């Protein structure tokens, strides 16, 4: 009986306050996360690859307007959507990523095409869009990505002249970081990670976050772990956060949980690196640490039922 397969997904972390969340909105998040976990888990249950499970999961997160990725991406300063995404295969550490792309329906699938059908790891801006077109990837008009609540956030961020990681319908003071990600371990012992984001509200100058940077926001290696991060990208880049978890496991022999705790709570939190990450190791153990008030997340393993959560329990 194959065991130890597992999946974890996240839909962003931040100051997610119970007091400001309506019951309807909370239900909508739980339902969406449930569907995403279920879809990824089905791939694993049927003996599919971790790589396929994380792509399926992140595509669904990108299609759901609740999450800051794909369709639900936040607005740039100019009122556009510029998306970043990365995928990594723990079997051989192959990886693909896109940065600053516009109008691509599922940037995570473009990242996978880059991994599998190009000699490169990271493509950006119009060049990446040309590649996506050549690969037959679906494009959508600007209207597909329009969300009134996120447009309102942009107006507030413009007035205060701040760059906001916020998303959702809460006032701008309520800080919610947004991004979507998945990590998985399949029945064959393979690990994979995928992350996709619209980045930060009011971002400009072609700002790129940690999500598409291998080792910062996304990492996978069968020998150690698969990681997808969410949070204040600049801090995660400087911390090389995802790879640091793998390094602590490989070079110091720490458990997944201990390595994640050190990175999220001891290294990122003290310097203002707010957010969290989801992680799975070679044995199928999961860790979902965050130093913010909440993180949209969901898990299911061969031995434990589907669980979705938002706040600190
Ligand atoms: N890490 C993402 C970025 O900095 C945003 C987030 O996770 O909220 O682009």
Image (cartoon, rainbow, N blue to C red):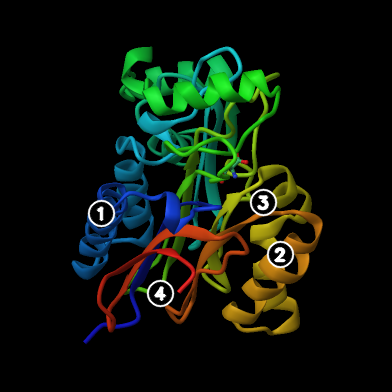
Task: State the CA–CA distance, disc 3 to disc 4.
Answer: 23 Å
Q: 222 or 207: nearer the eye?
A: 207
Task: State the CA–CA distance, disc 2 to disc 4.
Answer: 21 Å
Q: Which residue is found at the position 53% from the left and 51% from the top?
A: 94
Which mark identifies residue 216? Answer: 3
Residue matched to label 2: 244
In the displayed structure, does residue 125 sit left or right of residue 29?
right
Image quadrant for the N terminus? bottom left
Q: Residue 74 in the image: state x and y as whole percent.
A: 49, 29
Residue matched to label 1: 27
Q: Is mark 3 within 8 Å of ligand 1?
A: no
Residue matched to label 4: 189
Q: Are marks 2 and 4 in contact (CB under 8 Å)?
A: no
- Give the vertical position of 42 relative to 28 (above or below): below
Q: Earlier in the sequence, mark 2 or mark 3?
A: 3
Which mark identifies residue 155? Answer: none
Q: Is mark 2 within 8 Å of ligand 1?
A: no
Asked which secondary structure carries label 3, the reply is loop
Q: Earlier in the sequence, mark 4 or mark 1?
A: 1
Asked which secondary structure carries label 2, the reply is helix
Q: Is mark 4 within 8 Å of ligand 1?
A: no
């Amino acid at each position: 009986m194959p065991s130890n397969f597992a999946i974890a997904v996240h839909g962003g972390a931040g100051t997610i306050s119970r007091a400001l969340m309506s019951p309807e909105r909370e239900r909508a998040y739980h339902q969406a996360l449930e569907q995403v976990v279920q879809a990824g888990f089905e791939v694993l249950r049927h003996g599919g690859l971790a790589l396929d499970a994380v792509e399926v999961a992140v595509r669904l997160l990108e299609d759901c307007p609740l999450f800051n990725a794909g369709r639900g991406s936040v607005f740039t300063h100019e009122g556009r959507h510029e998306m970043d995404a990365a995928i990594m295969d723990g079997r051989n550490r192959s990886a693909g990523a896109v940065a600053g792309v516009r109008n691509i329906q599922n940037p995570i699938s473009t990242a996978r095409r880059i991994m599998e059908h190009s000699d490169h790891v990271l493509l950006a801006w119009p060049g990446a869009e040309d590649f996506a077109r050549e690969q037959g990837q679906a494009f959508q008009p600007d209207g597909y990505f329009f969300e009134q609540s996120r447009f309102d956030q942009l107006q507030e961020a413009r007035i205060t002249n701040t760059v906001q990681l916020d998303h959702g319908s809460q006032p701008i003071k309520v800080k919610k970081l947004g991004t979507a990600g998945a990590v998985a371990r399949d029945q064959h012992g393979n690990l994979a990670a995928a992350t996709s984001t619209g980045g930060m509200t009011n971002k400009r100058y072609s700002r790129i976050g940690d999500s598409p940077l291998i080792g910062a926001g996304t990492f996978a290696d069968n020998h150690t772990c698969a990681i997808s991060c969410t949070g204040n990208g600049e801090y995660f880049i400087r911390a090389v956060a995802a790879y640091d978890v793998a390094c602590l496991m490989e070079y110091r022999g720490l458990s997944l949980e201990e390595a994640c705790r050190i990175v999220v709570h001891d290294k990122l939190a003290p310097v203002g690196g707010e957010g969290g990450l989801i992680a799975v190791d070679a044995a199928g153990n999961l860790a979902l640490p965050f130093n913010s008030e909440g993180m949209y997340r969901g898990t299911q393993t061969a031995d434990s039922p589907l669980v979705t959560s938002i706040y600190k329990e």
